[in-house]
Amino acid sequence: MNGQRAEQQAAEYLSQQGLKVIDRNVRKKCGELDIICRHGPCWVCVEVKYRGNRDHGHPLETVNPRKLQRMIATFNLYLIDNNLNPAHTDIRFDIIAIDENELTWLRNVTI
């Protein structure tokens, strides 16, 4: 498996959990968003982290406050580009970590 396949697996998993995948691999000047979904009225930005094994730690260890701040800035630009006001839009940030055939989904991650 590679990062691209992990993102595909994550998107399929989210769909099975009732989320609607809206966009993938969105690039803006301040960063990239792996998966954007809707979960009812809530917009969900999902970061996918993959490691083939844990020799260098768990994939969740690669997510830090700086990464989350970049996700927020990038997601705000995405919302504005799609005529949505971030201050008046229900949003959530999730992380999916995949390694050694294990998928971990963390919802509503905060800094």
Image (cartoon, grey):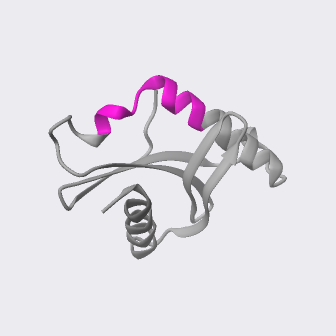
Q: How many marks?
A: 0
Q: Quarter of the image holding residue 23?
A: bottom right
Of 17 and 51, the residue lying toward us: 51
90 lies left or right of 77: left
The furthest residue to the front: 2
Residue 25 point in image, percent of width and height: 59, 56
Is residue 62 rendered magenta in the image? yes
Q: Nearer the viewer, residue 56 or 78?
A: 56
Question: Where on the picture, by quarter, is residue 80?
Answer: top right
> Which residue occupies the foreground of this view, 40 or 84?
84
Give the image quarter of residue 72. top right
- Helix, strand or loop for the magenta stretch, by majority: helix
Q: Position of residue 46 (x, y in %)?
A: 49, 51
Q: Is residue 1 above or below residue 88?
A: below
- Which residue is depicted at the point 50% across and 30% down? 67
Q: Residue at x 37, y 61 (%)?
A: 6
26 vs 83, left or right, is left
User: Viewer-proximal residue, 82 or 10?
Assistant: 10
Q: Is residue 101 left or right of residue 73?
A: left
Q: Residue at point 39% right, 65% down?
A: 5
Taking 22 as reference, is 78 above or below it?
above
Residue furthest bottom in the image: 16
Magenta stretch? 60-71
Residue 99 in the image: state x and y as whole percent.
Answer: 23, 53
The spot of residue 73 in percent (x, y) is: 66, 33
Q: Residue at x 39, y 33 (%)?
A: 63
Residue furthest to the left in view is 55
The quadrant of the picture occupied by the N terminus is bottom left
